[in-house]
Image (cartoon, rainbow, N blue to C red):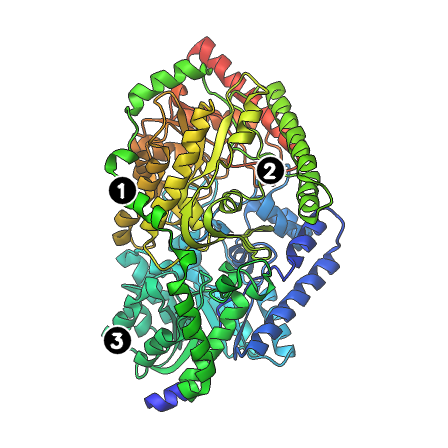
Amino acid sequence: MTAQSAAAAARATVYGYPRQGQNRELKKAVEGYWKGRVDADALRKTAEDLRRSNWRQLADAGIHEVPSGDFSYYDHVLDTSVMVGAVPARHRAAVAADSLDGYFAMARGTQDVAPLEMTKWFDTNYHYLVPELGPDTDFSADPTKQVAEFREALALGLTARPVLVGPITYLLLAKPAPGVAADFEPLTLLDRLLPVYAEILADLRAAGADWVQLDEPSLVQDRTPAELNAAARAYRDLGGATDRPKLLVASYFGRLGDALPVLAKAPIDGLALDFTESAATNLDALAAVGGLPGKRLVAGVVNGRNIWINDYEKSLATLGTLFGLADRVDVSASCSLLHVPLDAGAERDIDPEITRWLAFARQKTEEIAVLARGLGQGTYSITAELITNRAALASRAGSALTRDPAVRARTAAVTDADARRSQPYTERTTAQRARLGLPPLPTTTIGSFPQTAELRTARADLRAGRIDTAGYEERIKEEIREVLSFQEKAGLDVLVHGEPERNDMVQYFAEQLTGYVATNHGWVQSYGTRYVRPPVLAGDISRPEPMTVRWTSYAQSLTGRPVKGMLTGPVTMLAWSFVRDDQPLGDTARQVALALRDEVNDLEAAGTSVIQVDEPALRETLPPRSADHADYLAWATESFRLTTGGVRPDTQIHTHMCYAEFGDIVQAIDDLDADVISLEAARSHMQVAGELAAHGYPREAGPGVYDIHSPRVPSTEEATALLRKGLEAIPAERLWVNPDCGLKTRGWPETRASLENMVAAAREVRSRLATDGS
């Protein structure tokens, strides 16, 4: 095929699309179902309407081939477990009795049955439910969902491509089921799983699917020769089947590396690659293997994870270099658009100068269609779009909104000493214990307490002018008094004010820092029905005035027990925002760290003895390739220390992390030099406690004993068992007792019962330690 005919064949497509709807209709329907206000038929109708709306929007924007099967009530990896019959034994009865209720039981648990473990989807803030597999796992095909949704798209007259999590990624994401040896490798089940995938592919082909997309993002990570051989075997077998659709293997979130020649040689029909800045080497690597002769290449040239407009001329140049490297070149985003909000056009309160720099999912589909048209018909066909694009890019590059000379001068003046505490931990801990006077196994929470409907109503009333600031603040004070009173009665040792004034742990701070822009409708799925509105980091960062001191000090005035000051750390402020892409991340992190340092110092000056700087995104933001880890961890840990390095030795610095694979970053956790770390551990059965012990972690730690992402109330006996397990790895003088994460999403009845059980467990174990030394 000539370059000219290859260009003419260019089409527009996407890998996936946001699920929630313009007004989070899916969240409301699912939560209504859980509460009994919405029946199953109404929930299914809402989901069907959302899928149809999404597909029509894509088609109207000029997307030639829409994805199907990427829609989910909760999580696409959980959907895959259902598709291949990998339902844990403890959930089989519930699934057999009612497939929908059983599905949600796997996701959320019940009072009697624990849910699946949850962790981060690669280096994103999306959480997936971890498959539980073992040597006795028997897979079976259930393509009902995938076939039905594909047929829905066909019925609308659309060209659709079913999307499945690929078999290699599925197995690499899995963990040994409870009771299975920890060294069991799920990838050993590949030969058992492949016939199930082949059956599902055949069913999709019978339903009329011409192409099926198999997502293999695990292959952009470092992979062993054995894992690469498994990938070669998987796609040799699936590609060699006779009764199958064409196979498009999709990779994203980085460069494909050693897996690229493996897939290039496999008998598949197409390959989707990331060609954005983070994976630019994919282009050279593709040329080095001789391209994809006779195959389709889907080129991800529009960033699917950030919200800045595309540089059309740069993308067209990249696409032009791909001519001759494949039989057909199509245009797409770098990954599913699940990771960006739905529509920048819905934002009415953002400065128009900034709005023209933004592209959410709807705008990105339009960009993809423009690029496909320019590639296929020539740049003359998109002259107007190119002129508008150049002007918007120039506006951003030259805008005074993006640069603050004072901030840049302060950042340039940072020294190594600024990122170090004045004394080592071994000396600080003596001063802190003398100041705080805490018992063994001190109890605390992570920070937030339930955000009730009354609190959300009060915030809405303030925005709408139905109450004034004084009335709103009295409501906040009332909530803080209630939260403090409960904690004292429950017997917690280090208290929190509950964060009733905060809408989100990142957005709350972003709204008070210069350089950030908040959205009204920029919702992105974090997990299940939990959606967040990541702020947009558009310019240089500073803190005009204190952000948390008033409410922390008010809470401390109500009690003689220590109240923690609560902040979100610099890495998480970046990771859970849409960060600027016009300067190195490390530079932006230092700006945020210096702003937070001012807040930490002001909290200490106000008398706060315990300050928690949360960094749940430290592991999440770790680059896929180990060769990139050192540079990232250097600036990430430095930014935390820069935030906390200015406090006195007797001020205790806490940090918190949750729902990630912490074993990969234990040295980095150590390098933070925090005095206490609290970590998610309940769903993973205290795995992290052993990882800390194996590293020789020398500081205090609180591996969680209460899974807050499930509505079930853990018993005192359950919390006691986890606490005793934690003591096997961490000595009592360094072990804290706390939940896995904040309590914002929980209701008050379950929160009260769970925390009372947690405190009772701590008291019981303390008593045993005092009487028998065990």
Q: Earlier in the sequence, mark 2 or mark 1?
A: 1
Question: Residue 417, located in which quarter of the rendered image?
Answer: top left
Q: Tell me if label 2 and label 1 are in contact, CB under 8 Å.
A: no
Residue sitting at x 66%, y 62%: 47
**How far is disc 2 from disc 1 in space, using C-alphas?**
34 Å
In the picture, the quarter occupied by the N terminus is: bottom left
Residue under label 2: 501
Q: Residues within 10 Å of mark 2 (few under 14, many from 20)?
A: many
Residue sitting at x 42%, y 67%: 395
Above or below: residue 293 compared with residue 285: below
**How far is disc 3 from disc 1 in space, using C-alphas?**
44 Å
Residue under label 3: 287
Q: Residues within 10 Å of mark 3 (few under 14, many from 20)?
A: some
Which label is found at residue 413? 1
Q: Amino acid at mark 1?
A: Ala
Q: Earlier in the sequence, mark 3 or mark 1?
A: 3
Image location (x, y in percent) of residue 396: 41, 64
Image location (x, y in percent) of residue 115: 56, 43
Say left or right for 464 vs 678.
right
Q: Residues within 10 Å of mark 1 (few under 14, many from 20)?
A: few
Label 1 element class: loop
Image location (x, y in percent) of residue 625: 30, 55
Image location (x, y in percent) of residue 570: 40, 43
Considering depth in this image, is 449 or 766 the residue closer to the camera? Answer: 449
Which label is found at residue 686? none
Q: Amino acid at mark 2?
A: Glu
Label 2 element class: loop
Considering depth in this image, is 205 or 399 the residue closer to the camera? Answer: 399
Q: Tell me if label 3 and label 1 are in contact, CB under 8 Å.
A: no
Above or below: residue 284 compared with residue 545: below
Residue sitting at x 36%, y 46%: 407
